[in-house]
Each structure stands twice: as C-alpha cells, then as structure tokens.
Amino acid sequence: MGLKDIDIQGEYRSDRCNLLQDFYIPCLEKAKVYDRAVGFFSSSSMASVAQGLTAFIRSGGRMRLVTSPKLSDEDIEAITRGLQEREQIIERALVREFEQDFEQIVKDRLACLAWLLSQAVLDIKLAIPKKISSRGIYHEKLGIFLDSEHDYVAFTGSANESSSALIANFECLDVFSSWDERVQDRASNKVIS
C-alpha cells in the first residue's frame, strides 16, 4: 500500500476540501520520506497531523525541512558588520521567536519536536540569504511525499508548515503525482535531492 492507493487530486483548496484529512494525513501515512520547504514553520503543525505523523514514524519515515528564520534589523546589521558569528545571530533570532510564542505553544508539541530531532526523524535546515542585507526571505512553499515503492507526490501552494495554514487559513495546493503521465515532468522537477 502506497501513495498510488490514495485518490490524489490535482488541486486542494480549503474552501472545497479539508487539506489535512483529504491530502496531508493520507500522504503522510503512506510516505517514507517527507521533504518540505517553507517560509515559516511552527511546531503546531505536528499536533495537527498527529494521526499521520504516528504512522509515518512507525514506518521509519524521515522528514527534511528547510525554513526561513526571522532576522531583525539589528541582526542583519550585526551580520553585515561582522561583529558576531552568523550562527549566534540566527540562534538568537530563533530563541526570540520561541520566547514570543511560548505561551501559545503546548509543551507536548515542543517535546514531540525535540524527540523527532533527537531520533533523526526530522532534520531542519535554515535558509539564509546569501546577501544578508537583503530584506527578502526564503519563502518557497514546496512539499514531496515519497513512498517505499519510489512513487512520489509533489505539491506547491500557499501553505506554510503550521496549524494555521493547515486548519484555519484559506490555502490552495497544486499537486503532481509521479505516476500521472499528464504531470510527471512537473512532479520530477519538484523533487529535492
């Protein structure tokens, strides 16, 4: 049983379907690898997909996430002047983000995130602009589910990796399956190596 066994649509819109129940959780339950590139990540996404995440972990699944940190003007200035190490600035920005949201974050979600990282189920990389003085951030929204049969589903759209995006926001996902001859080229172009 793999991704081909799911009725995959070409598009999912939150006004017509439930992104979690109709797409995200079924794909996660069948996947062995989940690659995700987003502008923003929140541990709240873990709680939203608990059902699919449990099956994913039990099957030995691995998740790779690329996301953008939030850097303040002061952080950018310090990096530009070279007064502090780049990693220290990024670490401080992440700590500040967690401190701001701490009251909203349930301890179980943080424990889940810590466990996923400690067990190497989840690998997180931060996307930092080459020109740190640039005001832009890494804001791509791309995902790929790969199963044990080497079939994959690639998707792009407006959703970040957060419970707001998966549950509350109006979002749209365009989906490309590797076995669908009409979109095979689009699917293969999305694969992260």
Image (cartoon, rainbow, N blue to C red):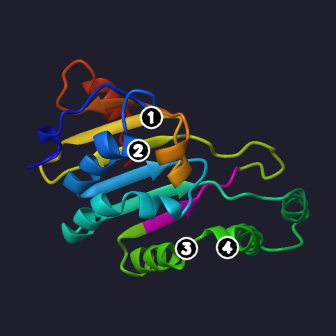
Q: Quadrant of residue 52?
A: bottom left
Q: Residue at x 17, y 31 (%)?
A: 179
Q: Which residues are magenta?
A: 123-129
Q: Which mark is residue 106?
A: 3
Label 3 crowding class (10 Å Cα cut-off): few <14, some 14-19, many 20+?
A: few
Residue 186: % across, % down: 34, 26
Residue mark closest to the camera, 2 vs 3: 3
- Name the secondary structure under disc 1: strand
Residue 162 vertical placement versus 88 (above, below)? above
Residue corresponding to mark 2: 143
| Circle 1/circle 3 CB separation < 8 Å | no
Q: Earlier in the sequence, mark 1 or mark 2?
A: 2
The span from disc 4 to disc 2 (Cα, nearest Å) is: 27 Å
**Is any part of residue 162 visible from this angle?**
no
Q: Residue at x 91, y 63 (%)?
A: 81
Q: Is residue 146 left or right of residue 91?
A: left
Residue type at tag 1: Thr
Q: Earlier in the sequence, mark 2 or mark 3?
A: 3
Residue mark closest to the camera, 4 vs 2: 4
Label 1 crowding class (10 Å Cα cut-off): few <14, some 14-19, many 20+?
A: many
| Circle 4/circle 2 CB separation < 8 Å | no
Q: Earlier in the sequence, mark 4 or mark 2?
A: 4
Q: Which mark is residue 156?
A: 1
| Circle 1/circle 2 CB separation < 8 Å | yes
Residue 160: % across, % down: 54, 46
Residue type at tag 4: Phe
The span from disc 1 to disc 2 (Cα, nearest Å) is: 6 Å
Say whether residue 171 is magenta: no
Residue type at tag 3: Val
Residue corresponding to mark 4: 102
**Is any part of residue 120 visible from this angle?**
yes
